[in-house]
Image (spheres, grey):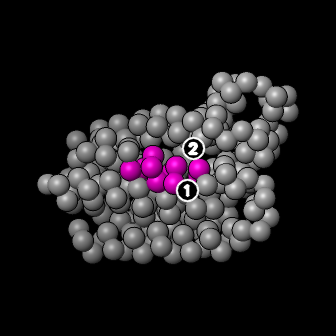
Amino acid sequence: MIWTEMESFLVSCGGIFLAELGDKTQLLCLLLAVKFKRTWPIILGITFATLVNHGLAGWVGHLLSQYIHQDILAWIVGLGFIAMGIWMLIPDKEPDTELDTHVSTKSFFKIFVTAAFVFFMAEMGDKTQLATVAMAARYDSVLLVVMGTTLGMLLADIPAVFVGQKLAHILPMKLIHFIAALLFIALGIASLFFV
């Protein structure tokens, strides 16, 4: 019982962390940090947006679990991981950099709201949101799945806020994206063997 709960948290956290490496929302975090030059309202904004987004996705996944057998869900999650790994091999379009140019001088709250809104909208229908739906459908604890997926997002995105523009031109994002895709596919294959 305890291992299953830990598994739901760890798989959710690790899977989303891998999916988020080199994703458009990670690039969006870099852009927000460069634009506003204030880390904490951005971090709080992306945290709030992720909790709301993944909370909704977890709820949908839980509803699906009421109608689909657990063995089928395990296969769906495994195949979903593989599909997301393949999806990661397709480059994302870079996020729109045309944010409100007057916001950089605005208050902590206005930066928080801007970051939360932009991040929430960027995550709608994204692979990490769909992965959260699948994992919440697979595991019994929606709360642990949402906590895991949120932590995975933040582990990938918060460093991007701190890195900002300085390393944005140096990081080989295509290589990072490729390695993350291979790891995600491997995680999906491993999930299929442990059904």
Q: Position of residue 109 (x, y in %)?
A: 66, 24
Residue closest to the eye, 162 or 119: 162
Residue at x-position 67% and y-position 64%: 91
Residue closest to the eye, 149 or 194: 149
Q: Position of residue 177 (x, y in %)?
A: 61, 68
The residue tagged 2 is 123
Q: Quadrant of residue 20?
A: bottom right
Q: Is residue 126 magenta?
A: no
* Type of amino acid at the residue the image marks with label 1: Ala
Mark 1: secondary structure: helix
Q: Position of residue 190 (x, y in %)?
A: 33, 74
The residue tagged 1 is 156
* Residue 114 vertical placement versus 78 (above, below): above
* Type of amino acid at the residue the image marks with label 2: Glu
Mark 2: secondary structure: helix
Magenta region, main secondary structure: helix
Residue closest to the eye, 150 or 183: 150
- Left or right: 90 as drawn, with respect to 31: left
Q: Range of the magenta residues?
A: 148-158
